[in-house]
Image: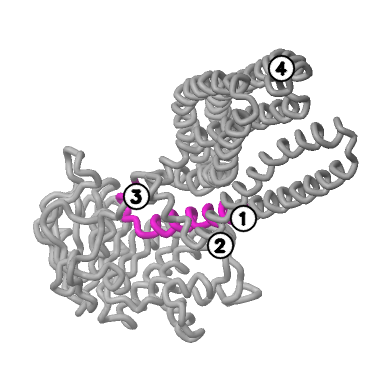
Amino acid sequence: MLKRLAASIRQYKKESILTPVYVTFESILEIIIPTLMAYLIDYGISKKDMSYVLRMGLVLVILAMLSLLAGFLSGRYAAIASSGFARNLRRDMFYNVQKFSFSNIDKFSTASIITRLTTDVTNIQNAYQMLIRLAVRSPVMIVFALIFSFRIDAHLSLIFLAVIPVLGIGLGLIMSHVHPIFVRVFNTYDRLNNTVQENLRGIRVVKSYIREDHEEQKFKSISGSIFQDFSKAEKRLAFNMPIMQLCLFSSVLLLSWFGAKEIIAYNNDPVAGLSTGELTSLITYALQLLMSLMMLSMAFVMIIISRASAERIAEILSEESDLKNGENPAYTVKDGSIAFENVTFAYSRRNDKPVLDGINLSIESGETVGILGATGSSKSSLVQLIPRLYDVMSGKVTVGGVDVRDYDIESLRNQVAMVLQKNVLFSGTIKENLRWGNENATDEEMIRACSLAQADGFIREFPDGYDAYIEQGGTNVSGGQKQRLCIARALMKKPKILILDDSTSAVDTKTDKLIRQAFRKDIPDTTKIIIAQRVSSVQDADKIVVLDDGKINAVGTHEELLRNCAIYREVFESQNKGGALHE
């Protein structure tokens, strides 16, 4: 995990190295200062030697300024290193998510990925900054403070050695009890973000059904769980400070008690006792030592909090897409012919029942194929196998005579344009949305695509025309307008295969018919697959596939299915007033 995270430091290695270097330099200077203060007291102030006081005072001022400069530089480089590290982590996670297949995305909820990109990365950033500063400064201070303390008086310095195990055991116990709570907290954060996201996305439904109280209660419940867990964790972390204070004040009291006796002994025998300056420096070292331990404990607390975040980030970074190119992938799609050969598919291999079973279907290049079936008959699952959004469990799907698993994924998807059930537009102008299909498209190409999708008319009614701004999610256009813009965007790719997954459900039957007529006339060589609930949307197709419970029930033209397929005939009659139109 640490190796995986460390790979995101990259260009900030220099700052990450310079920070502990300056911290070490700063720490050494702070360790030297108390010893020089002892010399100032013993050889300058006690002996009333002002020239010595001035010389030593000047040296102390210089050392203090150098220490200040080193501290400033270490803080500056630590800020750059930690911020850069966080930026790279976010980038690496986001880029890796872009490579995920649908099954990979299904493994992590959207809210969970957002939490990992925000809260978890912030925790890691704070922990990293502490790690390269406090976690370096504290050990350096502790080691050198102990060395200088033993150099002054080995017996009194044993007090420090007695304190360190007490702190170590206390911190260890705190860490072992707190980490599981933070793991649980961040998982609860995922649920909270999911609830907020779901509420905002469906706010119109919430208000329509007057369910604000229900949503507030749901939010309150999850937020309360976070509060309870954080309270429990903070209560346990609160033991850190009392332990530190106990060790700090105990050390100072013991030093003062035994040090006073040493000073009395020094007045009688300078060799056997302890001078005032030495006791002062010893107490300073005690404070430095214990303050360093306190800072180290703070770093440990931050590491405890961030450990759960680090594990969650590493999960995203380590996740590999289960859809990969083969060793020698094909980069050219010959035509839009499609074949399903004994295809079985399930979203999870752990599922007992596949959503598609024994699918055999052949589609010629340029054909228009309609797919009809009840809700849950796996119509969308079938077409999602064509651009390899999922892989089959058994059998194979071929495009242009080549197994889709043998294509370069990007090359395959460039030739398959898919308009999904959930039409998504992004914030930006209509032109910017259309150029998702072809970033180098000319205005003439955009107008042609929108004309085919019956979108040009309403676009021109906007005051800014094709430069009209689309709000996030397309909230400022109607459902039918959104669908037509998404169809136009797909046409911009000039694909060999065009898949409309119930993408004209929000347009009227007249517009639906105009779209299909435009497709027949202007893109005859493109294979067109239309999933629809309305028979009228597919009845003039070259062939219609009727799906039932993940299996092909029948394949044929409109007239053939009316004669031979009970499911198709029932749907047709229910949509045409009991068959009056058929008669």
Question: Upstream in the sequence, badge 3 or badge 2?
Answer: 3
- Marking on residue 513: none
Residue type pointed to by label 3: Ser
Question: Upstream in the sequence, badge 2 or badge 1?
Answer: 1
- Marking on residue 477: 2
Q: Secondary structure at mark 4?
A: helix
Say which residue label 1 marks: 77
Q: Secondary structure at mark 3?
A: helix
Q: CA distance from mark 1 to mark 4?
A: 44 Å
Q: Looking at the picture, tell me which residue is in the foreground, 457 or 528.
A: 528
Residue type pointed to by label 4: Glu
Question: Is residue 211 something that shows in the picture?
Answer: no
Q: Nearer the viewer, mark 3 or mark 2?
A: 3
Residue type pointed to by label 2: Val
- On whether residue 383 falls in the magenta region, the answer is no
What secondary structure predominates along the stretch shown in magenta? helix
- Marking on residue 318: 3
Q: Residue at 70% across / 20% down in the picture?
A: 273
Q: Say which quarter of the image contains residue 361.
A: bottom left
Neighbour class for label 3 at 10 Å: few (<14), some, many (≥20)? few
- Do labels 1 and 3 touch, CB within 8 Å? no
Q: Nearer the viewer, mark 2 or mark 1?
A: 1
Q: Residue at 20% across / 71% down in the picture?
A: 329
Q: Nearer the viewer, mark 2 or mark 4?
A: 4
